[in-house]
Amino acid sequence: MKILILATLLFIAFNAQAQIDTTLLRRTTADTSKRKMNMDAIYNRPMLQSGKLPVSLGGYVEANYQHLGTDGISEGHQFQFRRLTLFVASTISSRIKFLSEIEFEPADKEISVEFAAVDVEFHPLFNLRGGMIVNPIGAFNQNHDGPKWEFTDRPISAEKMLPATWSNAGFGVYGKYYQNRWLLGYELYLTSGFDNTIIENEFNRTYLPAAKANAERFEESNNGEPLITAKVAVKNTRFGEIGFSYMGGIYNKYQEDGFKLDDKRRLDVFALDINTRISKTGTAFTGEYAWIFVNVPDTYSQQFGNKQHGGFLDIVQPLLKDNLLGWRNAVLNLACRLEYVDYNVGRFKETGENIGDEIWSIMPAISFRPNPQTVFRLNYRFQKQRDIFTNPAVNTAGFSFGISTYF
């Protein structure tokens, strides 16, 4: 049924496009290799408009081939259609606009709305946003579109420590200030949030992404307490951008119908993100690191950590920019991603030995961009993962190849 709904939406959109005089079509493009501030990523996407039609359409698609092995055991050749995402945007009137992001993930047999919000612009420094909001923790959560990255997989820390594409119902304000080469941006939101599944899940660890399965958060809060998300970012057009973000609140259901069930238990997340580029060489650095603090009940075993941290650093070096294979200004890049996550920071109470449950990965890559909106990428992953007892690491390695493009 969900697949039928998405197919109908796509049919209507492209059928309407086909009936419009193509001389009226106008494509608004976004050069994804030259990003604005991360807070602009929601709207910094290529769209297709037609004359005075009030709706703009766009989207992106990702498909991959993968061959990985873990300690010599492999599932062989795998072909993956990761996701198809549709953007629908509209300028309702002067200074009032709407954008939605609808994603189809075949592997999860899921169609989900990741973002659907109305923005009301009062002043560059003060704008209201309400609806389904992507919480701006770190940078990747807002800036997650596949065509913007040189790697087939999303960062481990952003997807399996933090909940990637984490969105909630709520309201907030945001704004920006410009002065010469400097830009200052802020965002502040009150939304619904997490629940007990972050410590009651099939992964048997403290795991924030488990809360994404609770669709009820878009209708009612688990405990009636707001999740606060705040971010401040500073950018210099010559040196790059740095952002500081916070997300926190009560995650457990501590009362019902006025009766106390449990103590209030907090979750707090702090994140730092950077992106910069060396002008002489064109080398780009994009990184993010987050620290998570969770009030885990004393009755839980020590495999549920109350502290986690992790992040990633992408290094991208253009090797060649020229007219290649008929594409003008095509770019060939050499890249590498460094990743680390510690799911359980601390030591065992009984022995004083370090608690493991950590993972690190190195992923060199070659990518080819025939245009800024399309990327072909070849990656090699080398990954080590240790259990909570720091037994010898499980080694995973292999190749992946994929294509991702806006349309």
Image: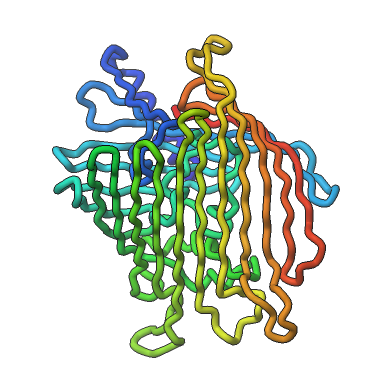
Q: Is residue 195 left or right of residue 218?
A: right
387 or 299: nearer the viewer: 387
Q: Position of residue 61 (x, y in %)?
A: 51, 33
Percent coordinates x, y for residue 392 in the rendering: 82, 62
**Whole-percent x, y for residue 1 in the image:** 48, 45
State the image quarter where residue 347 is shown: bottom right
The quarter of the displayed image where residue 343 is located: bottom right
* Quadrant including the C terminus: top left
Task: From this view, report whether residue 219 is shown above or below residue 182.
Answer: below
Looking at this view, is 339 or 42 the one in front?
339
Residue 203 drawn above or below residue 370: below
Q: Measuring 29% from the left and 38% from the top, which residue is drawn there? A: 181
Would you place residue 5 above or below residue 308 in this image?
Answer: above
Depth check: give the residue in front, 81 or 376: 376
Q: Residue at x 35, y 44 (%)?
A: 235
Q: Residue placed at 46% from the left, 31% from the top?
A: 279
Q: Residue furthest top?
A: 326
Of residues 231 and 1, the one drawn nearer to the viewer in this rendering: 231
Asked whether the viewer can see residue 78, the reply is: no
